[in-house]
Image (cartoon, coloured by chain):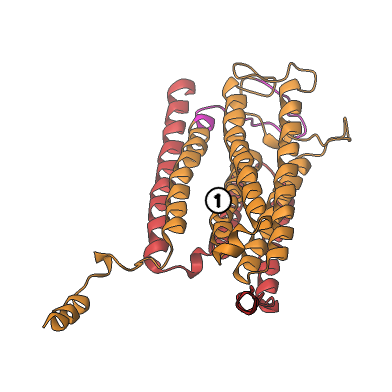
Amino acid sequence: MSTTAHTIDTTDKNIWDGGQSPLKASYGKLMMWFFLLSDAFTFSALLITYGLIRSAHPTYDGTVEAFTFSNEYWPIPEKVFEAVPFLHGVSLPLVFVGIMTFILIMSSVTMVLAVEAGHRMDKKAVEKWMLWTIIGGLTFLGCQAWEWTHFIHGTGGGGASLSWNEYGPADFAGLFFFITGFHGTHVFSGVLLNFLIYYNTVTGVYERRGHYEMVEKVGLYWHFVDLVWVFVFTFFYLV
Amino acid sequence: MHTEETAQIQVIPADKEKIKKIWMTAGILGLVTALEFLIAFTVPHEMETLRVSIFVAMTIVKAFYIVGEFMHLKYEVKALIWSILIPMILVTWLLIALIHEGSAIYNAIYL
């Protein structure tokens, strides 16, 4: 009798009643997705603020060649970001930020390869690709440190601080620091998480556990950081 | 000893097709970024609307590949895909609304 009741129970069971995964994803992965969604809200808020403040400022309407820095109008980004390390004085608009974008995309690719290797229980390959991902992240951070230093010191016009800058309205530098700074902080914590994963892989934690799902979860975070940069690149540097 | 031998981790060989697909996606992302770069310096600044539309479209293409392929969202169940996408669509609305609001502030100050 109890068996009959049991059968009725399972057939009438709603998928949300527990005991199964309606979204076909593990708890950890799902929570990472929802965390990333909330993180996306924060980044969206920063970028939307940029959109609002920029559209409330006058735009430069002369020719690009005749452009000069002024607090009267919003600067053309390619005129602000045109320096590349070791090539002092050469105007290379957006080249350095293009290199940074490429570095971050590449480190995203090595992360996918690490996740793929994890699925195959290939410890050596996970180690290799995680190491490349960490190197990519650190290189990006180094580039950003250079970019910030250059932006703060400026090109002889007084540089930039949170309250004033040589490039345009005060808010321009403020938004630069907040948006790229918040993203850089994410890259930094991403590198720390990646290192933790690398360490646990080397010491065989995941091999003993029987799966490399942690690589996937941190991988999601790392791709998200790359995704945010794609948006920052477009809305801060290109548009 | 023997039981430990059988418990050894079996490394599955890599699927060439899968690896190829990852590098293909990477290639697309690199290509789109290069194209954005090209457009930034070939399409004149006077055609602002065209420039912005191209950049936004290309960013969405890149986002699609990163989220769909790299983050694997394309292959998740529909309920998960929509629970991520719908909030972001609403955020896009906020972006449009506040940029509009920004130009209203501009008009109030300068016009």
Q: Can the viewer see residue A233?
A: no
- Which quadrant of the structure image shows residue B57? bottom right
Q: Quadrant of the C terminus of chain A?
A: top right
- Which quadrant of the structure image shows residue A112? bottom right
The image shows residue B109, relative to residue A89, as above or below, that is above
Q: Secondary structure at mark 1?
A: helix
The outermost residue toward the front is B1
Total numbered labels: 1
The colour assigned to chain B within the rendered structure = red
Q: Is residue A82 magenta?
A: no
The residue labelled by disc 1 is A221
The image shows residue A73, relative to residue A127, as above or below, that is above
What x and y, as percent, mark residue B92?
44, 47
Report the span colored magenta: A53-70
Query: Residue shown at 61%/64% (left/top)?
Result: A207
Subunit of mark 1? A
Query: Residue shown at 65%/29% (left/top)?
Result: A75
Q: Residues within 10 Å of mark 1 (few under 14, many from 20)?
A: many
Query: Residue shown at 50%/35% (left/top)?
Result: A46
**B43 sits to left or right of A222:** right
Q: As rendered, which of A71 and A99 lies closer to the eye?
A: A99
Q: As rendered, which of A219 and A237 lies closer to the eye?
A: A219
Mostly what secondary structure, the magenta segment? loop
Q: As rendered, which of B38 and A129 lies closer to the eye?
A: A129
- Which quadrant of the structure image shows residue A186? top right
Three-letter residue code for mark 1: Tyr
Q: Can the viewer see residue A133?
A: yes
**B84 sits to left or right of B21:** left
What x and y, as percent, mark residue A48?
48, 38
Q: Quadrant of the N terminus of chain A?
A: bottom left
**A54 sits to left or right of A191:** left
Q: Which chain is orange?
A: A
